[in-house]
Amino acid sequence: MKKRQWAIIGGLLILVLAFGLKNKLSQSTETESPKSITRLKALRVDEVKNGPVFLNIKVDGPVQAQQKIDLFAEVNGVLSLQATKFDAGRIYRKGEILLDLDNSEASSSYRALKSQYTNVLGQVIPDIKIDFPTHFDTWYKHLQNISAGIWEAPKNTDDEKLRLFLSARGIYSAYQNAESARIRLEKYQIRAPFDGSITEALVEPGQLVRVGQKLGEFMGKGKFEMLTSLSTTEAPLVNIGDTVYLSSRESGHEYKGIVFRKNAKIDPSTQRLNIYVLLEDVRLVDGEYLNGTISGPSLDKAMALSRKLLHKQASIYVVKDSVLAESNLEILHQSPEMVIVRGLKNGDLIPQKPIAGAYVGMPVKIISQ
């Protein structure tokens, strides 16, 4: 019986000792476990230095000749054989004949009406000498010029009686008939309105040409304009006369132009405003596509940043006391890659590159460049 009691007491002691040892070991493990280590995000930074930022607005678009016209026939006639054939690529100086239509009938009509005017004028000269002697020399000189082949309009007069007299004698109507025939005769010859070349020729010598028929296309050289568009935020920054630097990716040529027209109406389909750039360069080709920039105004107390650094579209992370803080920005101008902003203070530290998983209060470590 005593042995059994001692066995029970011994078992209880063993349990108590085992339980105490377990608690001791547990407390020792907790006190000896290492503390968690906070890892700092290492990054490189730039120091903010506000100053004037020169605005360059990117533009692109096709160029077209500023002087380009379609040639149409205003009279009927057969195209005459010319020393220089009317072909695409032909170069002409201003005033040279591009096309010459047979004008035999029109020329005869003009000569007849001109002769009729000369005869009517000759019949009234004696009466002018008697009834209006102070005007005789003027009208006699006019008759001499007409007879010598110098075509000119009748002389203006303030004498109402003389005007009525000349009108009753058919002087003015005879002149208008002859003048109309002269203008029609000139339409049988189509002359170059400016220096340029034929870009399209649609008729051949001997071909019958009718009124309203398109004959070809004539384009001036050296003067071109480029159509491009700006956003509603960019448009107020561009003015007439601003310089535009352009280049062609195909030819590699560089050009310099100026903004010479600016539309006051926004295109409803694009919500952009059209501007026109004037270029003067003989190397340009009609339809060539150019890319470049407009030199806009200088924006004071500003800084240019990569758009990738923006947070919430109008803020940026800055480093203060080794943690990230947020600074709000005023966006002055933005392009696909860059933004020009105000709102940062000189000396502020901003990350050089976007920070993955960044948040306000994030601890960081600045590393040297």
Image (cartoon, rainbow, N blue to C red):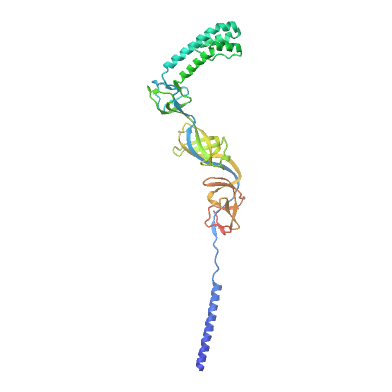
- Residue 250, horizontal then vertical, whole percent: 44, 38
Residue 40 or residue 226, whichever sits in front: 226
Residue at (58%, 12%) from the top-left corner?
A: 164
Residue 68 or residue 186, whichever sits in front: 186
* Left or right relative to 78: residue 143: right
- Residue 161, horizontal then vertical, whole percent: 60, 11
Residue 140 or residue 329, whichever sits in front: 140
Classify 118 as above or below 65.
above
Q: How many marks?
A: 0
Classify 176 as above or below 356.
above
Residue at (53%, 49%) from the top-left corner?
A: 307
Classify 361 as above or below 203.
below
Residue found at the far front of this picture: 168
- Residue 205, horizontal then vertical, whole percent: 38, 22
Q: Quadrant of residue 99?
A: top left
- Residue 217, horizontal then vertical, whole percent: 44, 28
